[in-house]
């Protein structure tokens, strides 16, 4: 994108000077979202349990002349999130956009799954998003200028994947939680929406796509003809975060290259079907 096109995109989004917090912003979709929001002129806080990667993304953005800080916090720890939120407010200002993106996965069948693994996934993917929303929505309400929540769920929150442990459950819960926020926070001018990514190539999934046979087989299933890159998600997240989506509330946007619509394609039709 040229500078001129970039500046048109920035002004179109209207995010200049807005304080945006991205959980799990140290890697993959979160890191790319931080880049997109910062290049749209936002002041970006990268909140991640991995202090090194949060700071690395923030340093990269500052190196490009953008405003960004890394803030270490485990979203499953309310105390850590409160401390990070206080620091972010002091250094950048009150949060106006929160992207709940941090998540973990533990594979395995539900029957026989340890409560420890079940609780860990829910404590990060679902309760962590609740905690972050409670803490950062308070800043939005105090700021009196509204705000936007974008939660990163998954196609697995729409369709169950066997052996994926508590992950699908956590994402389905996140989708419903967002709908509740969209009602409860609307009086404060705060919108709540979801981006549900399909297959996306990130550090979390790199081992899958490093195997060219699996990568090719997945690619052939997707009408778009390719697996998504983090930018495909980040651009949609930036749109929903912005005032350009100001009348969009309580929605869940499945960003999957059309894969969700392929179910009927697997049905045998015979020569006269
Ligand atoms: N990659 C995909 O194919 C795919 C598909 C559907 C949905 N998603 C969703 O997209 C989001 C980003 O996924 P990704 O593939 O970029 O993952 P990733 O593993 O590359 O990045 C996740 C980031 O979250 C951070 N994190 C994990 N637990 C945390 C915690 N407790 N507190 C704070 N930070 C924490 C990690 O340190 C990491 O930086 C997740 O919500 C994931 O469920 C991804």
Image (tube, rainbow, N blue to C red):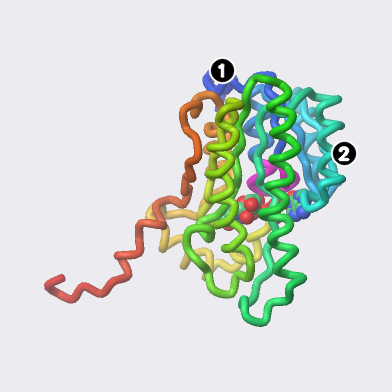
Residue 194: % across, % down: 54, 44
Q: Is residue 25 magenta?
A: yes
Q: Which mark is residue 107?
A: none
- Foreground of the two, 30 or 88: 88
Residue drawn at (69%, 33%) of the image = 137
Name the quarter where the C terminus is drawn: bottom left
Identify the residue under disc 1.
Answer: 11
Q: Residue at x 67, y 58 (%)?
A: 204
Q: Quadrant of residue 260?
A: bottom left
Q: Nearer the viewer, residue 227 or 210?
A: 227
**Numbered disc 1: secondary structure:** helix
Q: Is mark 1 within 8 Å of ligand 1?
A: no
Residue 209 is inside the magenta segment: no
Q: Is residue 238 above or below residue 216?
A: above
Image quarter of residue 83: top right
Please report the bounds of the magenta region as a residue range.
23-31
Q: With 32 as the anchor, is 249 left or right in this view?
A: left
Q: Which mark is residue 83?
A: 2
Q: Is residue 210 left or right of residue 267?
A: right
Task: Give the mark nearest the N terminus, 2 or 1.
Answer: 1
Closer mark to the observer between disc 2 and disc 1: 2
Mark 2 vs mark 1, CA separation in Å:
32 Å
């Amino acid at each position: 994108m040229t500078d001129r096109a970039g500046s048109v995109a920035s002004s179109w989004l209207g995010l200049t000077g807005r304080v945006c917090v991205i959980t799990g912003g140290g890697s993959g979709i979160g890191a790319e979202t931080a880049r997109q929001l910062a290049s749209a002129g936002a002041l970006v806080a990268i909140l991640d349990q991995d202090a090194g990667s949060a700071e690395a993304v923030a340093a990269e953005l500052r190196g490009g002349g953008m405003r960004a800080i890394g803030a270490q916090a485990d979203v499953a720890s309310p105390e850590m999130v409160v401390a990070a939120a206080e620091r972010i407010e002091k250094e950048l200002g009150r949060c106006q956009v929160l992207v709940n993106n941090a998540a973990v996965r533990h594979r395995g069948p539900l029957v026989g799954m340890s409560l420890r693994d079940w609780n860990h996934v829910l404590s990060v993917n679902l309760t962590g998003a609740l905690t972050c929303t409670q803490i950062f929505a308070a800043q939005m309400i105090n700021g009196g200028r509204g705000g936007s929540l974008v939660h990163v769920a998954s196609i697995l929150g729409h369709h169950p994947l066997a052996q994926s442990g508590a992950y699908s459950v956590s994402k389905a819960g996140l989708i419903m939680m967002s709908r509740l926020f969209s009602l409860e926070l609307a009086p404060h001018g705060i919108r709540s929406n979801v981006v549900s990514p399909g297959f996306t190539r990130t550090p979390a999934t790199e081992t899958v796509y490093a195997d060219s046979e699996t990568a090719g087989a997945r690619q052939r299933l997707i009408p778009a003809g390719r697996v998504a890159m983090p930018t495909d998600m980040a651009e949609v997240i930036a749109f929903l975060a912005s005032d350009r989506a100001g009348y969009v509330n309580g929605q869940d946007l499945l960003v999957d290259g059309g894969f969700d619509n392929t179910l009927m394609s697997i049905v045998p039709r015979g020569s006269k079907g």
